[in-house]
Image: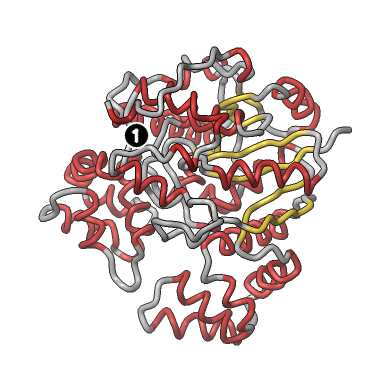
Amino acid sequence: MKSICGIIAEYNPLHRGHAYHLRAARQASGCAYLLVVMSGPFVQRGEPAILDKFDRARMAAAAGADLVIELPVLFATSHAQGFAAGGIGLLSTLGVDAVSFGAECADAQLLQRAARLLAQEPPAFSQALRRYLERGLSHPQARAQALRDMDPVCGALLDRSNNVLAVEYLQSIERLGAALKVFPILRQGGDYRQENPEPGCYASATALRQQLAQGRIPWEDIPAAVRPIWTQALEKARPVFPRALDIPVRLALRGMSLSALDALPDASEGLPRRLAKLAQESTGFEDLVRRGMTRRYSQARIQRTLLHALLGITQTDAAMLRRPPPLYAHVLAMGSAGGALLGELHRRSRLPIITQPASFAPSSPEQARLWTLDRYASDVYAILQGRAWGVDYTQKRAPLSIFPPAEFSPDFYKR
């Protein structure tokens, strides 16, 4: 039986560091096939992805992935624990053998030590966590500080975003009893918050999005193999930025009753009602986020709450985060070995694998609800792009090699 290694990603957008990770994961794991579970139209920070999910998936296939599967929007727009649980749950239930992730620390034993401490939650940790929460720290900040009090080395890991996800992946593997080997790859980029990376480092996705917002495509940071797909993507629509949510989010909040606001995932702390009130005075999405942020409520948490209001994600939906895995595997793109990998997955998977959405018939209320949320999120994104909705039912998923190469023009974006 040929081995399969999985990667959980957003590729928002895919850059040279991601291409490096795809190569390194294949080499480190020695796998025959590389499968990517990727966020769809919206990402974990509560923002629209910069490009359409099918274009980003095709880029991943061009950069070395054999198959790209969508992480359902409920998991893709959750906190780090829900995001990790969704990705690991999908890989495990599909029968994948290993998982590889990029992190600022590639010491698997140290990452595992931090994961176990957080999973065990000894009394001293729980007491410190409550103390820091009472001081007004956000939950991620309080958790990192409580861990630092117990183990300074492990606590320091949580200062870096990719380490945080790595630890969450390891906790999910333990919690789900997933038989996944782990291959951490040292992240080659600088601090993800830096617009200009250090010499010799790959630019981060954040830096690329900042350049795109300024009207420039940073071709030098985009792998050559995916540049034609960029050109094709931009022929269809411009990149989507958070400001595209200016009107939709405020309209969604304006139209929600108090009972609907109280049904949102963060309602227990009164956050949705607070944001609905602030929306009356805000001038747009980013202004509303700034008004809503406090020491306790981070930018990402505010954005996720606003996105949940737009997409209609409720507390009942969020309950599915506690019992992963996701209930199906929706194929977005295939590389040249995608057909062979699909055959392997059909022999191993305990989930339905969807390659023709029009033929998929959900078999349970939860499955139907998750599918409905995914289709609605895709249609909302298409509207943000100024395109017709229903793309999930019209998009080709054949191997990448059949797509004709587009004429590549580095000056395209300047038109």
Q: Position of residue 410 (x, y in %)?
A: 40, 29
**Location of residue 228 in the rendering, given as x and y in whole percent from the top left corner:** 49, 24
Give the residue furthest to the right.
1
Task: Indicate left or right for 34 with 281 as reference.
Answer: right
Q: Residue at x 59, y 47 (%)?
A: 86
Q: Position of residue 401 (x, y in %)?
A: 63, 17
Q: Report the residue at 54% width, 19% height from top.
A: 357
Q: Which residue is mark 1?
A: 239
Task: Say which residue appears at 21% left-offset and 43% top-offset.
Answer: 246
Q: Tag 1's secondary structure?
A: loop
Q: Is residue 296 left or right of residue 327?
A: left
Q: Quadrant of residue 223?
A: top right
> How many labels were placed on the picture?
1
Left or right of 228, for residue 341? right
- The residue that appears at 85% across and 33% down in the rendered structure is 2
State the image quarter where residue 133 is shown.
Answer: bottom left
Whole-percent x, y for residue 367 in the image = 55, 33
Q: Amino acid at mark 1?
A: Pro
- Depicted 139 relative to depicted 403: above or below: below
As drawn, the residue found furthest toward the left would be 281
Q: Quadrant of the N terminus?
A: top right
The relative height of residue 196 versus residue 99 in the rendered view (above or below) is: below
